Amino acid sequence: MSERFPGGAGGDASVTVPSLPRRLRPGDTVALVAPAGPVDPVRLERGTEVLTGLGLRVVHGASILAREGYLAGPDAARAADLQDAWCDPGVAAVICARGGYGTTRLLGLFDWDAMAAAGPKILLGSSDITALHRAFADRLGLATLFGPMPATGAISEPEGPEPVTFAHLREALFEGGRPAPVAGDRVIVPGRTEGRLTGGNLALLAALCGTPYALRARGRIVLLEDVTEEPYRIDRMVTQLLQAGCLDGAAGIVLGSWVECGDPLPMLAELLAPLGVPTVAGLPVGHGTPQMAMWLETNVAIVTESCSVAGTFRDSDAAT
């Protein structure tokens, strides 16, 4: 089954209706991998303990603590860890330990046929992991979870995970959970709309322009967020998405966190309001705390009266 959407970045794109992975149950095995930057072993240990405390069995990729400059080891090793975990029938979810840099370098190294044959399962990550979210959507037709990672601050602080973040992640990850709507603090364009959620980290979406994994927003609600980017750089990247056609036909815009980015919202409103679609800002999604989890490639609704985004993930629709 497929839908036809005129794609952003020019031309039509055939988009397969996404597969929804089975959500987790106590006793499931999850694999932690490091497809991007080097992982702090102390944070990794704390994050592993948090997941174990949820009743999960946690295994680590063979090279999860490797380091090569600003990367968590050589490209081939990072790709192999992720693919091995994905293709392991005993693994119910592949969880990225952290973001960083370098995930785009892996997209040409995977055996996508083998990964498709492994069937749907959960991929969790954010920030630089946006590259995987886009590739898994396009190559595997899979809904994935954009959310906090176990070796990052929202989960692995010495005093434990940030409570609101942790509660929302648990509801998103586990079977039967019902994540609460995610509320923002500013309406840029009023209205109501529904559509499949796409997007993620702005810098990664800009970097994917001109590649097979470029954002295609037609009929979709687009999430944008970033960290430690000056407003002029955010301006440049959003302008790139607009000029590349990646935001053509968007049904709505959701602006997440802009941690250590100054105040880019006036500029973002100037660039995005002319699209004329419901747009909300200030959602705690992306970086910082609290940090909510959102299922990409699933249907969500923007309701600007409550400045919120609500999603639906029905377990009856997911793989068994």
Image (cartoon, grey):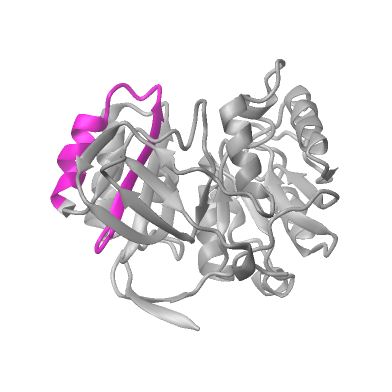
Residue sitting at x 78%, y 49% = 30
Where's residue 115, x and y in %?
70, 68
* Nearest to the observer: residue 133 or residue 113: 133
Where's residue 35, x and y in %?
66, 45
Quarter of the image for residue 57 reads: top right
* Nearest to the observer: residue 115 or residue 189: 189
Lateral position of residue 202 relative to residue 192, left or right? right
Lateral position of residue 176 relative to residue 272, left or right? right
Lateral position of residue 75 relative to residue 277, left or right? right
Q: Quadrant of the C terminus?
A: bottom right
Q: Does the magenta stretch include residue 1?
A: no
For the magenta stretch, what is the residue range? Answer: 247-274
* Nearest to the observer: residue 147 or residue 12: 147
Residue sitting at x 28%, y 59% = 250
Residue sitting at x 54%, y 61% = 135
Where's residue 318, x and y in %?
63, 67
From what the image shows, is residue 141 above or below residue 65? below
From what the image shows, is residue 256 above or below residue 172? above
In this view, the residue farthest toward the bottom is 1
Q: Can residue 185 be seen in this view?
A: yes
Residue sitting at x 86%, y 50% = 27
Where's residue 245, x and y in %?
26, 61
From what the image shows, is residue 172 above or below residue 67? below
Q: Does the magenta stretch include residue 271?
A: yes
